[in-house]
Image (cartoon, rainbow, N blue to C red):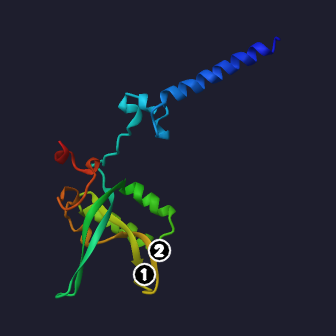
Amino acid sequence: MNTLIPRVGAGVFVLAGVGAVLYETRNSDNLGDLLSSKITDPSLTSKTKRRPDWNVCNVFWAESERSFNSVSRTASNRLTKIIEDFWTEEEFLKKIEKENLPNKEELKNKIKEGCSKNNKKAFIKYDTWRDPKDEKKWAKTWIYEEQENDGRNWLESKDVDVPENLKPESLTS
């Protein structure tokens, strides 16, 4: 009899817990609703998006579009979208140091050069790269294109999709 009372008590608590969960989710088809729909403080559910530090060089991941001029037989690149991921120059150089990239040294030099001359901004993309020493060798890697780093401020361009947290403060206020 002495062991029956604690077991009954534990059973009551388990049933009460199951009942509470069922009560909270009674009219929901979404499994993610469990008890989270009752949270009213947005600071508990929303994550503040990181903003660039404009005092240091930032390396922005971008997507671009290539167009060909059939008359001059030249190709040009134009950024179309800035991805939300970005790094400071130091963070990006540490990141690529850990990766096995075929163009690592060239990329490091171009990022350093670009950061020193392009108003503390560098734009890169992740794409297919052809080794200039062996034109049969192709690899997916980070690429720094001179055309996309010619001093234009892509973050302020109306033709480029830029996340709000990456725009300079003067454009968002």
Kindly identify which residue carries mark 1.
Answer: 131
Mark 1, Cα crowd under 10 Å, few <14 / some 14-19 / many 20+, is few
Q: Is residue 93 above or below residue 171?
A: below
Tell whether label 2 touches label 1 (CB within 8 Å). Answer: yes
Mark 1 or mark 2: whose residue is earlier in sequence: 2
Where's the N terminus, which quadrant?
top right
Viewer-proximal residue among 147 and 118: 147
Which residue is depicted at the point 36% across and 57% down?
Answer: 89
Helix, strand or loop at disc 1? loop
Quadrant hosting residue 70: bottom left
Amino acid on which disc 1 is placed: Asp
Amino acid on which disc 2 is placed: Pro
Where's the C terminus, which quadrant?
top left
Horizontal side of residue 110 vs 32, given as left or right: left
Quadrant hosting residue 140: bottom left
Residue 32, how many percent across, how many down?
Answer: 48, 39
Kindly identify which residue carries mark 2.
Answer: 102
Residue 12, how many percent across, how many down?
Answer: 66, 18
